[in-house]
Amino acid sequence: MEAIEEGFPDWTELGQDSGLDPLGMQRPIEAIYQSLIPGISTITLRYRYYSFFPFILKHYEDTIRNPDPAVFRAFYRRCEALYALICTHGQRELGITGSDWAADTLVSQAAGGVIDFAQGADADADEKLRYIKNKAGAFGAIYSTQMREMGLLIFAAKNDPNPNPVCARLALPLAEAFAEEVGDLAPRFFELVNRAQVSVAELAHFEVMKPSRLRLGSKEHTLLRDILLGKASGQAEHDLVRQATLTMLLQSADQKGAIPQMEAIKWQWFDGAAEAPQSELRVPELWALFQACDLIRLAYETILSAALVALSDAPRNRMPLTALVEELVEQANVPENATWKDFASQQGIDGDTARAHAQQMLEGIGEERVQRAVKLVSCLWRNTPVGEDLIQKALSVEDYFYSLRTEHRFLNGVSALPAKAVVSHLISDRVLKRHLWVASRKFRKQKAYTYHLEPEDGLIRYRSQFHVAPSSPRIEQALRFLKDISLIDENGLTSYGRAEMAAA
């Protein structure tokens, strides 16, 4: 699993003041799911980019060979801009970088017009004129790191005379296979890239390059399938982990007879971990652990959100901390004379109970949200569908990252105390004061002000609300990739998907 770096809680978007990850619990969750679908991210949207980029990189290596990163970037940005125009012309493809720019550009041109895309591809042009705002383009900002993780790219070492990424051995057959599919149009594509001009009429000639036009049974299709499913030569552990996850997705599609929904998959894997076949990689258990970690994050964030509602309803949007905690404890409605252990033993421990608590917690209103959050925490404490050894191993990080491991330890230490006292401590220290600590660290380290509530003259003051939402662990993107290579469709497994399952 990817190591979690030492330091303070990490935010994906630096400098924003929207309070992303207000309790600093997201990073351990991300580390789990990133290790389970390596080579795919939440923004790698179409799989055929994984053969398109080797195609253009090989051309650059063979014919241009300029080590200047600026020249290299200018080249691939023009390739991306032209590809966006090709994929947006006619039947518009989904998930293509620059497609909005391409659509606007095409609308402004007559059918017989010529598009000059030099400015749109220029990284130094006005941001509003670029096909993508990020100067690194889709290759540099989105796909290159994932393609390296999949074994398709080699990044330059320090002091390498060529600092640009190049095709790895595994990518060269892909580049050749894509070129074979493009055929005689390949030289013309690069000629247009060099000129940075293309006629609207000529775009239709390049339809074969679109992601949806991947020819089934072709060499390119076979290579993309084998690489995605970890069947290519020289398998590494991360390839086998991705293979296991994708096999689980194929099984879900087969059972459902449709493309499964992400939330349904997460609960299916949470419920089924105990019965899953044992393996050294423990992929089913890790997916269940991901869900358990995300659920406890959601429970804590729900309590924080409820605190913000209480503050926003208070006079002048301010309350003493003790009064705020007392109000939330009352909302939790835990019994007066029971210990935490006794209270937890009264809650169900099966997956259906946890799911019901989570659903009502996220969809309910008022006091019910806090009640369900506390009950969900008790369920996760009593019965997590993975072994303690895996919890300790997978979440073995510093304690400033709150996770299922830290909260298990906290609740184990207070299980004999009165339930009301435990809930009060949890709300006060594990949620409210935790948020103040996280926000202060982000302000000190990143100069971003992300307080949703803040201390003021001995009171706690409301500042802003936030949206509590489940994590998105790349499952939808993995399903999109499986669909791109025609292993699944709206009816579940395709004939190609069934063949893969039979061979697994």
Image (spheres, rainbow, N blue to C red):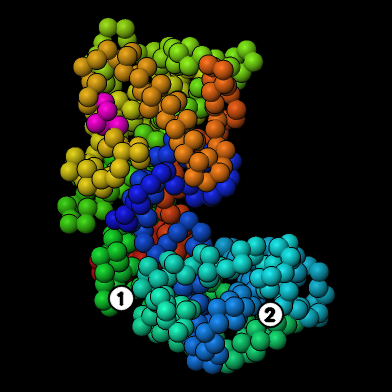
The foreground one among 62 and 183 is 62
Which image quadrant: the N terminus? bottom left
Is the residue 269 above or below the residue 488 in the image? above
Q: Is residue 83 visible?
A: no
The residue at which mark 1 appears reads as: 232
Is residue 408 on the magenta stretch? yes
Residue at 75 percent of width and 69 percent of height: 105
Q: Which residue occupies the foreground of this view, 34 or 427? A: 427
The mark lying in front, picked from 2 and 1, is 1
Which three-letter amino acid code belongs to the residue tagged 1? Ala
Q: Nearer the viewer, residue 97 or 301?
A: 301
Report how far apart the C-alphas of labels 2 and 1 lie in the structure. Answer: 34 Å
Q: Main secondary structure of the magenta part?
A: helix
Residue found 45% across the figure and 13% down from its top: 322
Locate residue 263: give its quadrant.
top left
Dot 2 crowding, Cα within 10 Å, few <14, some 14–19, many 20+? some
Tell me if 418 is positioned left or right of 433 in this view.
left
Q: Which residues are magenta?
A: 407-411
Q: Is residue 258 magenta?
A: no
Q: Which quadrant would residue 371 be assigned to in this image?
A: top left
Tell me the element at label 2. helix
- Give the side of residue 332 with respect to residue 49, left or right: left
In the visual, does 422 lie left or right of 282?
Answer: right
Element type at mark 1? loop
The image shows residue 467 at horizontal and vertical percentages of 54, 35
Q: Which mark is residue 203?
A: 2
Q: Amino acid at mark 2?
A: Leu
Residue at 65% of width from left, 73% of height from top?
81
Q: Above or below — where is 470 with respect to 489? A: above
The residue at the point 26 percent across, 53 percent down is 283
Q: Residue 195 sits in which quadrant?
A: bottom right
